[in-house]
Amino acid sequence: MKNIILLLLILTITAVSSADNRKIDNQYNVAFPGKIIDLNYIGARNYEKAELGYSVRYENKDNTKLDIYIYNNGLTELSKGLKDPRIRQMFDASENDLKAAIDAKYYRSAMLDDLDTNTLSKLLDGKYLSKKHTIIYGPALQKMDGVEMDSYTIMTGLNGNILKLRISAPKENHIKTEYIAKIAETVYELFKL
């Protein structure tokens, strides 16, 4: 009986300490949850240069990944949404970085496809997301460690920073547009967009 109580105590302490290690963004008053939809919190990374901000990763058992990036590239007074043309420029730069990575063979094989924006726009045209303040690009098909991955990038302005989401999943998972929209809505709710 003592062993069972000791085991329960250890599990409780482990659960509490792992919850305490989750990223908290004081600027936006966001405590990243242990789960977003079916994606589990993996960890956070602060980048050396302040303008690169930080990222948070979530992943599920099917190898679907959500990377959340908060950064400003050294730009000041970025607005919420897409009012600031610099946000579109940063999105285009992100797309160009992906193309450069493809050309440099960073991905074993990859191609860029246009997203069916009509379908996704309809799903995102709700309370939290709309085409006027969100830029969407994808899927980019990439091969990582022998697995073909579909990857979507969603960006918007966040009063002083950029909020960028990258949602990637093995192509065989047939990631659904509704799933992408639900993830994006959930993250946007965290940031009160």
Image: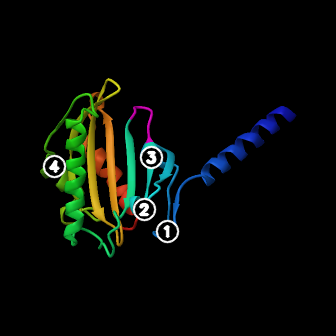
**Marks 1 and 4, how far apart at CA:** 32 Å
Q: Which residues are magenta?
A: 59-63
**Marks 3 and 4, how far apart at CA:** 26 Å
Q: Amino acid at mark 2?
A: Leu
Count of numbered badges drawn on the protein: 4
Residue 85 in the image, given as x and y percentages of width and height: 19, 69
- In the picture as drawn, the residue positioned furthest to the top comes out as 146
Q: Nearer the viewer, mark 4 or mark 2?
A: 2
Sequence order check, earlier mark of 1 and 2? 1
Q: Nearer the viewer, mark 3 or mark 4?
A: 3
Give the label on residue 190, or none.
2
Q: Quadrant of the N terminus?
A: top right
User: Do the CB atoms of the residues marked 4 and 2 lie less than 8 Å apart?
Assistant: no
**Marks 1 and 2, how far apart at CA:** 9 Å
Give the label on residue 98, or none.
none
Q: Is residue 118 visible?
A: yes
Which residue in the protein does label 4 denote? 119
User: Do the CB atoms of the residues marked 3 and 4 lie less than 8 Å apart?
Assistant: no
Which residue in the protein does label 1 denote? 29
Q: Amino acid at mark 3?
A: Arg
Q: Amino acid at mark 4?
A: Thr
| Most common secondary structure along the magenta stretch | loop
Q: Is residue 1 visible?
A: no
Residue 58 in the image, given as x and y percentages of width and height: 44, 45
Q: Amino acid at mark 1?
A: Asn
